[in-house]
Structure formats: structure tokens, C-alpha cells
Image (spheres, grey):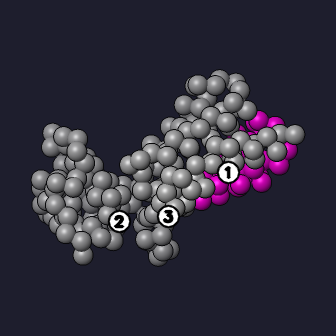
């Protein structure tokens, strides 16, 4: 198992947070940087400046901690839909193109190691893992919101466009990790807007 110390935890000063939030903050950083399987509860407790007993007082198991970490990520992802509406009120076509721009920023983020939920899905194939339903619900929920936006934008084949954009985004994250910034991922905006334009005619 990878040896991880507190020095690799989030740079922000988390030690003023209550124990539960501190553990979640550290777990989020370590899981994303090193992978869920590579990080043990000892490393999380040490990086959070606490101990395993405190961790298990707040989370019944590492699996439950992983599930809660992913729930927090899912909640953060959900706010994008409010932002799109706020920035482009009553204009679903503009919201759809803004979604592409926002997704592109996430793909191009130099600190990104891809989509944390997709990474977790690869690491946690067991259907009975408590995090699996969190991953699947978040991914399906995002797809449904994108589909609803496509419908409001009067896209001719909203289901097809929503699926194409979802697959384009998932692929862009993977391409950036495997090929780099100069690979196909850099064409995400052009490809996304071309798909939207093709379905809008």
C-alpha cells in the first residue's frame, strides 16, 4: 500500500474544522490524488491530525467514508445547473453552450486527475459497495438534467445529444489523462458545439 503522510493532504488549513469535516477534507484530497484503494484509514487519520477511533466514530467503515466523500462531490456538481440558469436566465440554448464551456474548464484544469466519480467507479466495481449507488445516481442525475436542458433548448433529438455530450465529456477526461493537453481533449469545445449545432438544425 502506498505510504502517504500529512504533507500530501490539502494545502488549505483544515485543522480548525470539526473532526468529521476535517476527515472528509483530507480523505477527499488523498482519495483523488492517490486513489481510493491506495489510501488506508491510518493515513487519513494521521493527515487529519486525529486517530482511527475518531474516524470510526464518525464513519462506520472506510467504505462509508468513501460514499460520503462522493456524496459531497455530487452535491457540489449539482450547483452548476443553478449557475447556468442564473447566468443565462430563460435562455436554454445559451445554457447548453455554457455547459460545454464549464465542462471544458474542468477538463483543462491542470490539477485535475479526471472525473473523481468516474475514477471511483473504476476502482469500485462491486455493485454492493455503498459508493456504487452514489456514483450511479450522480451520473444518471447529471445525464437527466442535461437531457432536460436539451429538451428546453428545442433540440430535435434531445436524448441522442445528451448521450453524445456525456460520452464526449467522459472521453475528454480520459484523453487528457492518457494523451495530455495537446490530444483530442483540447477539441472538446469545438466538438461539443458542433454536436449542438448539428442537432439544432
Magenta: main secondary structure: helix
| Rendering quarter of residue 198 | top right
Outermost front residue: 182
Q: Tell me, yes or no, whether the two marked residues, 2 and 1, touch with CB atoms within 8 Å.
A: no
Q: Gap between marks 3 and 1, in whole Å?
A: 20 Å
Q: Position of residue 160 (x, y in %)?
A: 77, 54
The residue that appears at 59% across and 32% down in the rendered structure is: 84
Front position in the image: 17 or 99: 99
Q: What residue is at 50 percent from the left and 37 percent from the top?
A: 79
Mark 3 or mark 2, whichever is nearer to me: 3
Residue 162 painted magenta:
yes
Q: Is residue 172 left or right of residue 116?
A: right
Give the percent coordinates (x, y) of residue 85: 61, 29
Q: Is residue 75 visible?
A: no
- Horizontal and vertical percent position of residue 171: 59, 59
Q: Which residue is mark 3?
A: 178
Query: Mark on residue 35?
Result: 2
Q: Are marks 3 and 2 in contact (CB under 8 Å)?
A: no
Instruction: Please report the residue visible at 55 percent of the width from the left and 39 percent of the height from the top.
Output: 102
Q: CA distance from mark 3 to mark 2?
A: 16 Å
Asked whether 4 falls inside the magenta stretch, the response is no
Res. 124 mark: none
The quadrant of the rendering that contains the N terminus is bottom left
Q: Earlier in the sequence, mark 3 or mark 1?
A: 1
Question: Which quadrant does the C terminus fall into?
Answer: top right
First-in-chain label (2 vs 1): 2
Label at residue 165: 1
The stretch in magenta equals 146-173
Amino acid at each position: 500500500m502506498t505510504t502517504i503522510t500529512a504533507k500530501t493532504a490539502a494545502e488549505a488549513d483544515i485543522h480548525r474544522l470539526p473532526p468529521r469535516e476535517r476527515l472528509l477534507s483530507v480523505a477527499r484530497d488523498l482519495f483523488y490524488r492517490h486513489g481510493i484503494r491506495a489510501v488506508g484509514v491510518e493515513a487519513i487519520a494521521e493527515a487529519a491530525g486525529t486517530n482511527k477511533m475518531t474516524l470510526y466514530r464518525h464513519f462506520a467503515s472506510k467504505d462509508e467514508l468513501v460514499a460520503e466523500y462522493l456524496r459531497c462531490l455530487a452535491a457540489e456538481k449539482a450547483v452548476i445547473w443553478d449557475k447556468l440558469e442564473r447566468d443565462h436566465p430563460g435562455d436554454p440554448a445559451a445554457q447548453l453552450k455554457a455547459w460545454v464551456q464549464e465542462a471544458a474548464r474542468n477538463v483543462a484544469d491542470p490539477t485535475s486527475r479526471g472525473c473523481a466519480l468516474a475514477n471511483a467507479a473504476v476502482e469500485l466495481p462491486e455493485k454492493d459497495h455503498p459508493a456504487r449507488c452514489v456514483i450511479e445516481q450522480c451520473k444518471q442525475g447529471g445525464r437527466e438534467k442535461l437531457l432536460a436542458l436539451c429538451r428546453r433548448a428545442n433540440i430535435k433529438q434531445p436524448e441522442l445529444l445528451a448521450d453524445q455530450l456525456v460520452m464526449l465529456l467522459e472521453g475528454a477526461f480520459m484523453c487528457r489523462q492518457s494523451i495530455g493537453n495537446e490530444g483530442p481533449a483540447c477539441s472538446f469545445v469545438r466538438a461539443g458545439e458542433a454536436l449542438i449545432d448539428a442537432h439544432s438544425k
